Amino acid sequence: MDNMQKLIDERVHEYYWKYDYNCATTMLLILSEICGIKLQQQTLDAAVAMHGAGKYGAQCGLVEGSLMFIGIYGRQKQKADERIEKECRGFAEGFEKEFGSLMCKELRPEGFKPDNPPHLCEGLTKRAVRFTLDYVTGNDN
């Protein structure tokens, strides 16, 4: 395992089990740390219910957090709005191809049941953070 994946694995585990953050918040925090971007508290506040639209099962929080980050990162890199939009679309297409869906209810192991243990998506999150990081840094030029 490379050092980057080790960092991702450690942070995902910490943010889920120590802080009980959701997937969107976890995604934002890890990507911002790795890319050296300071997030405003208001951004993290906006992500508080972005885990399938408050557990409704809609768009996955890993996708939502990634899309938010692509916008933040794009602004930091002074990319035009049209380019950021194109990169978000490309990300969504790539994520769907890689993971099979953009929908939380389809990606989440066991779906949503009252007796589900917490943080069922830890493994998926680790893979999705790496996928997103590779996508974001691959579009730097």
Image (cartoon, rainbow, N blue to C red):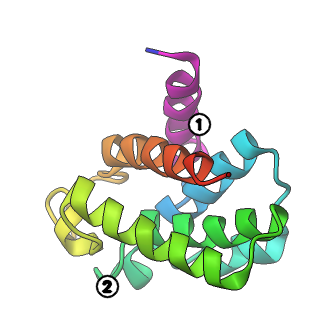
Q: Name the residue beneath numbered marker 1.
A: 11
Residue 43 in the image: state x and y as whole percent. 74, 74
Residue sitting nearer the eye, 36 or 59: 36
- Any magenta on residue 15? yes
The image quadrant of residue 1 is top left
Point out the residue furthest to the left here. Answer: 110
Please tell me which residue is depicted at 63% across the width and 84% down the height of the picture.
82
* Distance between mark 1 and mark 2 Cα atoms: 25 Å
Which amino acid, mark 1? Arg
The vertical placement of 24 against 85, above or below, is above
Q: Residues within 10 Å of mark 1 (few under 14, many from 20)?
A: some
Residue sitting nearer the eye, 128 or 138: 138
**Residue 63 is at least partly visible in this image:** yes
Q: Residues within 10 Å of mark 2 (few under 14, many from 20)?
A: some
Q: Disc 2 on helix, strand or loop? A: loop
- Specify the segment rendered in magenta: 2-18
Which mark, residue 56?
2
Residue 86 in the image: state x and y as whole percent. 52, 77
Q: Is residue 44 left or right of residue 119?
A: right
Q: Disc 1 on helix, strand or loop? A: helix
Which amino acid, mark 2? Tyr
- Any magenta on residue 17? yes
Residue sitting nearer the eye, 82 or 60: 82
Q: Is residue 38 left or right of residue 34?
A: right
The image quadrant of residue 83 is bottom right
Please tell me which residue is depicted at 54% across the width and 54% down the height of the picture.
20
Which of pointers 1 and 2 lies earlier in the amino acid sequence? 1
Which SS type dominates the magenta stretch?
A: helix
Q: Is residue 101 left or right of residue 69?
A: left
Please tell me which residue is depicted at 37% across the width and 52% down the height of the picture.
119
Which mark, residue 85?
none
Residue 66 in the image: state x and y as whole percent. 53, 64
